Amino acid sequence: MDKAATDVREYNLDPDSELRFEVEFAATATVKLLNGTAEIFGVELAPGNAYHFSGKKIAVFTWHGCSIELSGECSVEYTANETPMDSYLNLHLALEQMRVIASQQGENGPRVLILGPHDVGKTSLCKILLNYALRQGRRPVHVSLDCSEGSFTMPGTITATSINNIIDVEEGFGSTATTAASMGSTIMPLAYYYGYQNPAENLPLYKLLISKLAQGVKARSAIDDEARVGGQIIDTTGLIDQVGYDIIQHAIAQFSVNVVVVLGHERLYSDMTRILRDKPEISVVKVAKSGGVVERDQQFRTQLQRSKIQEYFYGTAKYELSPYSTLTNFSDVSIWRVGESSLAPTSALPIGMDRQMSETQLVKIDNADILLHSILAVLNADEKDTETTALESNVAGFIYISDVDDGKQKLTVLSPAPGKLLKKHLLMGSFKWMET
Ligand code: ADP
């Protein structure tokens, strides 16, 4: 397809087929449903409404046939008659059956772990399953253990979010937090800040935070019937090496997972059936990868992370935010990093501390210099909290250090909400950002 095609194209889609297109970050494409019914990752399109996309790879799927209009600049654009949507719908129906039983018997709904390598459509399948559940009046919880993307908040974060609104077609998951913030709400998903893109970077910390997140989700399910019955759809990182298997088993145990879905990977499926054969209460199912899933290179991922950060502070074209810039004394806050000493040899660690402990230990930052252009998580911890309890605190929000005055020991802080967000304990990870 011509890269610069900006004219209006009309597509007539047969039942069970989809239109796939990709839009660069600098371009915009617009979709309009003219006739029939269609959905994007499980969200039904409203007829006649114009949906705009930038920096996205999209499939408009139809169960019963439709005609759609596409305009704007797409780098890729084609229709496909073969999709795995039938199997995704069947999976949803099986999960729905489990919810019906859970509701009748006062038990927990399905806890579903979505597994597969990078770029097989895990996040897309999560969206489809969540939207289908929502369309049936359920309120499932979306758990994202994918710290490279930071579905709802910031890269480096793992989250649990109760889905009670249809996911925004144009913005994907990003909008939920942004919309909440733009309406002056401080509602955030339950989030823990890990601070790195790769779970292998500090595995003990990553696993500790998964445990905390699972505790939070279970506590919520215990007091909220709809969340309990809705269950959880858990998105994962795509790591399927030894570290990945360790994480998978940890997540299964912590979230009491009872459905493991393997997307498009035979060996992973067979390993999971073998590893879980002593646990008949856990079903392992495999589903096909969609031919439309697009591989994203590191450049696209970095761009995605940057746009997530930008979106957190400034909102999107649809929901603009005006962040606040303030000056803060470096001495008024405690800024931490995790596991600094893990770089030191074991013999150099304080007596009585092993490497595992040091990797989940907070180390105070005493030099304001290194904070320049850093993203910091504002921890839900106060003055009384110790280093250990602060580390295990969830995240209230994020701030950005746009400038450091070393002489005066002052920080210029960008925050999406005035004042409210600046608490005592701040956590730094590896993410830096430059405002554009
Ligand atoms: P994973 O979570 O396994 O890394 P994603 O679900 O994020 O994979 O999919 C990778 C990319 O492919 C995403 O940009 C997504 O929007 C796109 N994608 C997924 N399914 C389709 C499809 N059927 N048609 C077009 N693009 C798709």
Image: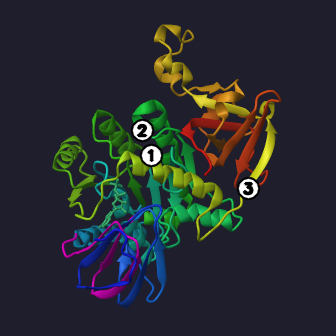
Q: From this view, report whether residue 323 is shown above or below residue 247.
A: below
* Location of ligand 1 given as a quarter of the image: bottom left
Image spot of residue 225 (x, y percent) = 51, 66
Res 126 quadrant in image: bottom left
Assign a secondary structure to mark 1: loop
Q: Check if residue 3 falls in the magenta segment.
A: no
Q: Which residue is mark 2?
A: 198
Examine the rendering and report whether any part of residue 423 can be seen.
no
The mark nearer the N terminus, 3 or 2, is 2
The span shown in magenta is 57-83
Q: From this view, report whether residue 298 is shown above or below residue 80.
A: above
Image spot of residue 318 (x, y percent) = 59, 71
Image spot of residue 1 (x, y percent) = 28, 71
Image spot of residue 274 (x, y percent) = 18, 43
The mark nearer the N terminus, 2 or 1, is 1
Q: Which residue is mark 3?
A: 417
Give the distance between the C-alpha atoms of the residues marked 1 and 3, in whole angstroms: 25 Å
Ligand 1 within 8 angstroms of badge 2 C-beta: no
Number of other residues with Cα within 10 Å of mark 1, as a class: few under 14, some 14 to 19, many 20 or more = many
Contact check, label 2 and label 1, Cβ < 8 Å: yes
Task: Considering the whole magenta stretch, tell me its main secondary structure.
Answer: strand
Contact check, label 1 and label 3, Cβ < 8 Å: no
- Give me the residue at 33% from left, 34% from top: 243
- Give me the residue at 17% from left, 45% from top: 267
Give the distance between the C-alpha atoms of the residues marked 3 and 2, in whole angstroms: 29 Å
Q: Which residue is mark 1?
A: 148
Assign a secondary structure to mark 2: loop
The mark nearer the N terminus, 1 or 3, is 1
The label number, if any, that marks residue 93 in the structure image: none
